[in-house]
Amino acid sequence: MKTAVLGLAIALLAGAPALAAETLTVPFTTPDGAISAGSYAGTVRITVWGYGESDATALNDAFYVFNGNDDDPPYYQLTFGKTALVPLDPAQDAVNFIEGGRPTYSPNHVYSFLLDTGPTLAQLHFGVGDGIFSDNKGAFGLAINAPEPSTWALLFAGVTMSGAALRMSRKKAQTAAV
């Protein structure tokens, strides 16, 4: 019994490619700029850095336009989803999925935050929500880090419940056979 539960836990951990850090380059030249190789669920730590040009000459990083007044956040900023991203969709603004909301401006243009990727495992899509990509230049660097402790806790709880269910079904089968 314990061997079965341990085997299940090892299989789940071995099949979860999101347990190690993954680095992506997210170009400003397409709405669906980068897709993770691994599948993720729950809360993950994201670190994003870099800046580029949107709207021909407007410099911006993942969350702020550099002209001092952040004039168009939904369209030049980092977008996120679990399916292909499309231009000009404010619902895909990464800020909608960040625990605690948009990070405070960073003069070195590096931001680290917790991103809620939802309960189901899927590849993650990152991009820029701009509507015209032909006048854009640059890219974000983005690192997806191992799941947060709450994700590990859920995984452990799932394995534990699977083991308990298996144990109870065997006990019922033994009782019925007597």
Image (cartoon, rainbow, N blue to C red):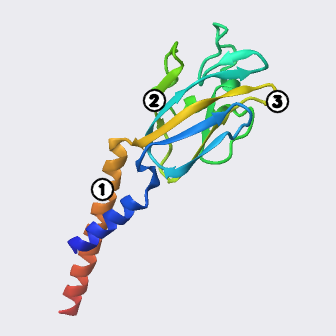
Label located before the other in sequence (2 or 1): 2
Which residue in the structure is indicated by mark 1?
Answer: 157
Viewer-side label of 3, 2: 3
Can residue 123 be seen?
no
Which residue in the structure is indicated by mark 2?
Answer: 113
Label located before the other in sequence (1 or 3): 3
Label located before the other in sequence (3 or 2): 2
Where is 31 relative to 56, above or below? below
Could you tell whether 64 is left or right of 144 in the image?
A: right
Where is 106 relative to 114, above or below? above
- Number of marks in picture: 3
- Number of other residues with Cα within 10 Å of mark 1, as a class: few under 14, some 14 to 19, many 20 or more: few
Q: Secondary structure at mark 2?
A: strand
Q: Secondary structure at mark 3?
A: loop
Tell me the amino acid under the disc marked 1. Answer: Ala
Between residue 59 and residue 163, name the one nearer to us: 59
Q: Position of residue 16 (x, y in %)?
A: 43, 56
User: Which residue occupies 63% across, 7% down?
Assistant: 68
Question: What is the distance, in whole Å, between disc 1 and disc 3 at their CAs?
Answer: 48 Å
Q: Position of residue 164 (x, y in %)?
A: 25, 68
Question: What is the distance, in whole Å, between disc 3 and disc 2 at their CAs?
Answer: 30 Å
Between residue 147 and residue 134, name the one nearer to us: 134
- Number of other residues with Cα within 10 Å of mark 2, as a class: few under 14, some 14 to 19, many 20 or more: some
Viewer-side label of 2, 1: 2
